[in-house]
Image: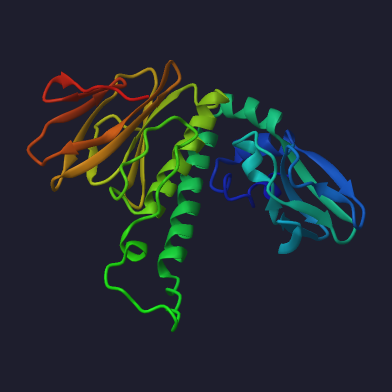
Amino acid sequence: MKDLIAKIDFFSGLDDRILKRLGDASIIRQFTKNETIVRQGEMGLGVYVISRGHVKVDREQSGVRTQVADLGPEQCFGEMSLLDNKPRSATVTATVDTECLLLTRDSFMKLMNKYPEIPIRMARMLAERLRVANEKLTQAPAPAASPATPATPASAAQAAPEAPGTPSNGATPAAAGSEPGMKTKVRDTLLDAFSSLYTMKAMTRFSVAVLGCPVEGIAENAVEQFQLGEVKILVFAADQPAALRIAAHEPGQFTAHWFSPDTPERHWGPLAIDPADEVWLREGVLEKKGAPEDRRS
């Protein structure tokens, strides 16, 4: 079971003892040919890893069902149900007699509270998934212009970024045009992930700072740091004082977000910053030149 659990990218790279505990907490499920395993619109039980057989993944939109994937042994589905409590976005059906390993959300939450390495690993892998998705979209060729529609230099459709919606975590959205639409979506998706982890009380031993461009975060006592595009994530031990200096290489605007087990989520920005400014984020309080900034949450 441990070896199968290690095939899930959220868990690959974890210590063997943690993988064993995840495997021990999982159950074996058997499905017959044409049996529905996950139904679009219903709540998910957890993540499934296929040990034998094959499944198809269908998505229905506007009454039209389209097959989007065909999965086989050592592949998984439903992993996002570990992070959110939202209805599933696709239907998964066994195309032959199939056996899966199921790690339920309830079992997973108990292990997350015991092993903080698990939620940190999940956050890193979610960031990596978003980075890869962002790169694919960036590298995709632009659609050819329609002959019937003459090209107009710097038209609104070409120059204006996609307007972001209001994030579900309550963060104040950036002003229109302050960030490209995809960067805003990536940031907000990552914020939603951390919000879910703290709502589930899965990160009771860590605090997290998330910074948006064009700044750097400087902290001596961060236990983990990683970056997704221009979004920086720093992780601190919750029982230690957190002091994070925010520095800019050029004038601009930045956003800051703070997650902690003992305080409500805190969100700031967009705020103006200059390379000469001295800005600190200490224990969930943002200070600029020693004066606390207005907090937006």
Answer with left or right where residue 95 lies relative to residue 48.
Answer: right
Q: Position of residue 76 (x, y in %)?
A: 69, 52
Q: Position of residue 108 (x, y in %)?
A: 66, 32
Residue 72 in view (yes/no):
no
Query: What residue sits 46% from the left and 37% below the top?
Result: 167
Viewer-nearest residue: 148 or 188: 148
Q: Quadrant of the C terminus?
A: top left
Image height of 246 relative to 153, above or below:
above
Residue 275's quadrant in the figure?
top left
Q: Position of residue 263 (x, y in %)?
A: 41, 16
Query: What residue sits 18% from the left and 37% below the top?
Result: 272
Answer with left or right where residue 254 lies relative to residue 29.
Answer: left
Viewer-nearest residue: 166 or 24: 166
How many callouts does the rendering have? Answer: 0
Q: Quadrant of the N terminus?
A: top right
Residue 182's quadrant in the figure?
bottom left
Seen from this angle, which residue lies furthest bottom? 147
Answer with left or right where residue 203 lies relative to residue 228.
Answer: right
Viewer-nearest residue: 165 or 283: 165
Query: What residue sits 73% from the left and 46% below the top?
Result: 48
Q: Position of residue 135 (x, y in %)?
A: 42, 62
Viewer-nearest residue: 16 or 147: 147
Seen from this angle, which residue lies furthest right? 32
Query: What residue sits 43% from the left and 15% below the top?
Result: 262
Residue 213 in view (yes/no):
yes
Q: How is the image coloured?
A: rainbow
